[in-house]
Amino acid sequence: MRTLFLLFLLSAFGSIGFSDTRPNIVFIIVDDLNDMPLQPSGKPLVPTPNIDRLKAQGVTFTNAHTNDPLCAPSRASMLFGLYPQTTSLYWFENWQDNGIYKESVSLHDNLRKGGYGVYGTGKVYHGNQNGLFDEFGHYGDVGPWPWDGQSENFRLPHPQQLFLYEGEDADVDYKWEHVFGPLSDIPDWPADPANGIPGYKGWRLFGKPYRYVNSDDRDPLADELGAAWSAEVIKRQHDKPFALFTGLIRTHTPLYAPQNYFDRFPLESIELPVVDPNDLDDVSIALGNESLYGFRRYKMLVRHEGKDLFRKWLQAYMACVSFVDDQVGTILDAVEDSPERDNTIIFFTSDHGFHVGEKNFLYKGSLWEPSTRIPLIVAGVEGSAVGATCDHPVSLIDIYPTFNELLELNRNPNSDTNGYELEGHSLLPLIRDPENGEWSGPDVAITTIPGKNHMQHRIYEGTLYPHFSVRGKRWRYSLASNGGEELYDHDKDPFEWRNLANNPEYAFVKAGLKTQLIELRDGFSWNDLEDMRSWTSAKGVKVHGGEIRMSGGGSAMLATKDSFENFEFEADMKVEPKTRMKIRYRKEPGSVVYSPILASDEAKYSCFHVGEWNRYRIRVHDSRHQLWINNRFVSDDVRDATSESGPLIIEAMGTRSSDVRIRNPRIRKL
């Protein structure tokens, strides 16, 4: 009888346990797209009817920010749910080589484990995307490209714009990304027989000739191929819920687009962004160094008097925004024509913003609003507000937890790997109630940039000590690695023209934001080492006046009771003359740090001073060993990894006497 009853239930409710009615996901991420689709004041107006269509269907987050305004770290952080300051990936490194990311479960793997079919096209991750999706469409290519007739040459600038690199800009990096214009400006590279260059007329894309007759008679661009493939995936019959990730590579430079998109924005109609000629007078020295890449890119255009190059560049950016909007329209049309229309959630965002002249800057990679602010729209969530906006500060770190809650995925995906908990917070409460939703995250969104820049003219040797900024509902506070500060009141100063950091009237506001920044920057799980019960010590070690003092007739040693394999260690340390300090960790000969020798390059660069307090930071994860002194990069080495942990040991070495003092020591396991 019981068996017959169970068979009856299965017959009557055959779908129970066998069908999956969870929503599908369409996730669109655009490269280098700033907040123009939000139509902010101070920027030229670019109509985006398709993105507006999406706004009308859901919630637009008007105070959303990237966690690192560079492609590689931003996308890695978003897709793994871990801050750059947690993984130490701040720059254009391969995330697949990062020790923490290698052991973490990506959003895509969590979707797959949760029963989703996962599709991708274009630029989703930065770098190799092989094997990351169940099915992949088309690779992103920021071309088409000019060519000089030599197949090994790739990413050349436009030959008709080589005048940009004359004179003071002859040494500018990445010449291919400063050029712009309509595809109707067919490149014609002159032959140079003396250097073996045959010359070539025409464009190339995906390593092949690209056909362009006019806007209506041409080969499709990479984003058009990706949008069309996405539409085809959406229209398929799926036997399980799907998650489709479409990476649109425009508006990444070089800013090429079909002529008809340029025609939408006649030059004479374009209003330049609002700027203040004295804007840089009060910014942090580190953040406002005019030798930085973004400042140089702006100067490159405006120094050519009479050519109106900046306005033409702006026209090209606007044309690319409009081009992107049309690709979004292709995808939205497919969703609306799909039988799954009412069971599909759409995310739309960018990896970071992009300056279009504000602060005389023309790039991403800053801690100001034009670089950190991104469009973020979520539509199609059951119970969501419609046509609404939310001004609570959020960031890309919140995407992964939002997926997990919306789609009933594992909310602690790394529990069986490295144990790292996701650091963002689900946006679902704000999607359902943008004004009063019970947000569990912080009151500010944090963004970081590495203390490295494209204009350093050297091969990547590691990430310099990064700078950080937090954005709340009203205020932005930034803290540079050299201690420089910026504070802006967005209620009264939306363009961030007046730095209030040194105004005592706002000291209380600054102090509160700085506390929040440091908490988000440094993370949690730190263990203080100020109490001697955390150490084992030899003769000559004592605590006095809040300091640990090491002194002896030749050497003194201090070792942590706990052992560490992967860790971060920080402390203020003072090394007296005729003394050298040595820090050892792990049980291998190469795991050692010495205090710099007086007058050495290390001492000069890190501002290390004998007999004064210097701040040390050591980070070790797998084979990567990083050292900063006084928030300045000293070394970033890859050494033979060992699985054998050991205590952290500090030694004071001298011939007859030695003296090392330590304060505010702390450590955390990674």
Image: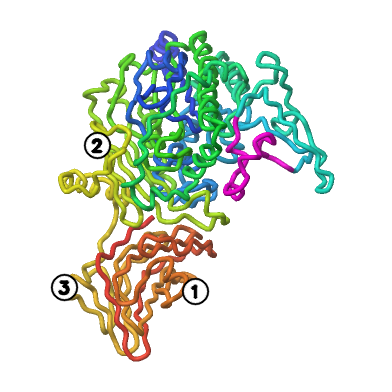
Query: Gap in Å between the C-alphas at discs 1 and 3?
Result: 34 Å
Q: Earlier in the sequence, mark 3 or mark 2?
A: 2
Which amino acid, mark 2? Answer: Asp
Q: Earlier in the sequence, mark 1 or mark 2?
A: 2
**Residue identifier under label 1:** 589
Query: Gap in Å between the C-alphas at discs 3 and 2?
Result: 40 Å
Is residue 481 one of those drawn in magenta?
no
Give the secondary structure at mark 3: loop
User: Where residue 545 is drawn, which disc sits there?
Assistant: 3
Q: Residue furthest right?
A: 193
**Whole-percent x, y for residue 220 in the image:** 66, 21
- Which image quarter is the N terminus in? top left
* In this rendering, the label closer to the viewer, 1 or 3: 3
Can residue 307 be seen by looking at this rendering?
yes
Which amino acid, mark 3? Answer: Gly
Looking at the rendering, the stretch of residues picked out in magenta corresponds to: 153-180
- Which image quarter is the C terminus in? bottom left
Callout 1 touching callout 2 (CB < 8 Å): no
**Residue identifier under label 2:** 489
Horizontally, is 138 left or right of 500 in the view?
right
Give the secondary structure at mark 2: strand
